[in-house]
Image: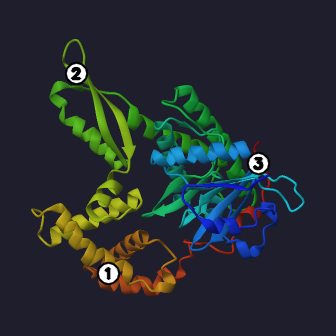
Amino acid sequence: MTLEITTARPESALLDLPWSTPLEEWPESYLAAFPRGISRHVVRFVKLGPRVLAVKEIKDDIADREYAMLRNLRRLDVPSVEPFGVVHGRTTADGEPLDACLITRHLQFSLPYRALYSQNLRPDTAVRLMDALAVLLVRLHLEGFWWGDVSLSNTLFRRDAGAFAAYLVDAETGELHARLSDGQREHDLDIARVNIAGELMDLAAGGFLEEHAEPFEVSASVIERYHTLWDALTGTERFEVGDRWRVDERIRRLNELGFDVDELSMTTDIGGTEIVITPKVVDAGHHSRRLLRLTGLDVGENQARRLLNDLDAYTAATDRQGDDEEIVAHDWLAKVYEPTTRAVPRELTGRLEPAEIFHEVLEHRWYMSERAGHDTPLEDALRDYVATVLPAKPEEKAVLGVDTEEMPVISRFD
């Protein structure tokens, strides 16, 4: 058999990896000690020059299918890991065939749920984690993606201005349709309900779950949050003709949920007295797209909302409400955001990504101002944050020394 490597971009260094060795036996010199979630397959993080890649050993046809599915999800701009390549034709030195390998990029600053829970999450933080999963599931369903294996284990989480953003990791069982039926969506929700409860029961048995948290209640809360979001995004509303202003209110409500309205379907009934308004096409990322357009910063949705709030405050403080928005945004970027993020010492830059650091500095300034009874300059808040808060943060760009695969698993649902 001939070794075949298919990649989205040429990378000759892939040839140097020990493909003739079962992935479970790869030497430590090739590996990066990142936290791994639970997986039915062998998964290893591999150093390749400046990059870190996740390599999963699976059957050839499954590897091809998942690689193609992840590429489709990326084209749809769904939060998911980035596919990097597939390796076929692997054999041992004795000529014994080995399974194929699916390669994805490691998502920087992301963590599996077991690594987060190992940090003794506060109850409100755990709730935000579940909210992030519900939002991800809504986004996938809006794009016609049936997951088939919804679980915390198949998700990565990144901090997003105090909240979390969830990313799909495993698309092995997924199917992409033009539109999902209610039955398909409910099937995914049933799978989510059982899997999440089982994973939380494992955490509870290992002493990692908050004492009063009940796994089935937490699991049900994800489904409830999903239905709330889904109804807000796709539900039909009827308005009197004189209440057309409520159309704008509906759009603002969707924007606050992190979604943008691309098209509305309006139907007037026979009496002509009411208008039925149904969002026809919705997409997430209203704030992040606006910030990207104004500044070129590509950050999480909640981070973008917080940065835009600071941009608005800067606009008001400099009395430039009438100026071109893009010019003001450029000045804010050069005079406020970049000097703040660049002032972080090099040895601390791996603790949090720049946008999250900026968000936390703003939070720190607010607390300092509240204690002082007057406004605290941003420079003073930054200096105090770097000295007293940031050094205590765990390294999240590449978390070392915590292999969540080794955390005890007491019980699991099949």
Pick the front one: 272 or 184: 184
Establish if 133 lies above or below 189. Answer: below
In the rendered structure, find residue 274 and report the number of the disc placed on it. 2
Q: Is residue 90 left or right of residue 226?
A: right
Toward the right, the furthest residue is: 94
Identified by mark 3, the residue type is Arg
Callout 1 crowding tier (Cα within 10 Å): few <14, some 14–19, many ≥20: few
Establish if 211 lies above or below 27. Answer: above
- The tag earlier along the polypeptide, 1 or 2, is 2
Whole-percent x, y for residue 330 in the image = 23, 69
The residue shown at (47%, 81%) is: 389
Check the picture and name the quadrant holding the C terminus: top right
Identified by mark 1, the residue type is Pro
- The tag earlier along the polypeptide, 3 or 2, is 2
* Residue beneath disc 3: 412
Whole-percent x, y for residue 102 in the image = 67, 53
* Residue beneath disc 1: 339
Q: Nearer the viewer, mark 1 or mark 2?
A: 1
Q: Could you tell me if the residues under marks 1 and 2 are in contact, i.e. CB atoms within 8 Å?
A: no
The residue shown at (82%, 66%) is: 25
Pick the front one: 336 or 85: 85
Q: CA distance from mark 3 to mark 2?
A: 52 Å
Toward the top, the furthest residue is: 270
Q: Quadrant of residue 341?
A: bottom left
The residue shown at (23%, 12%) is: 270
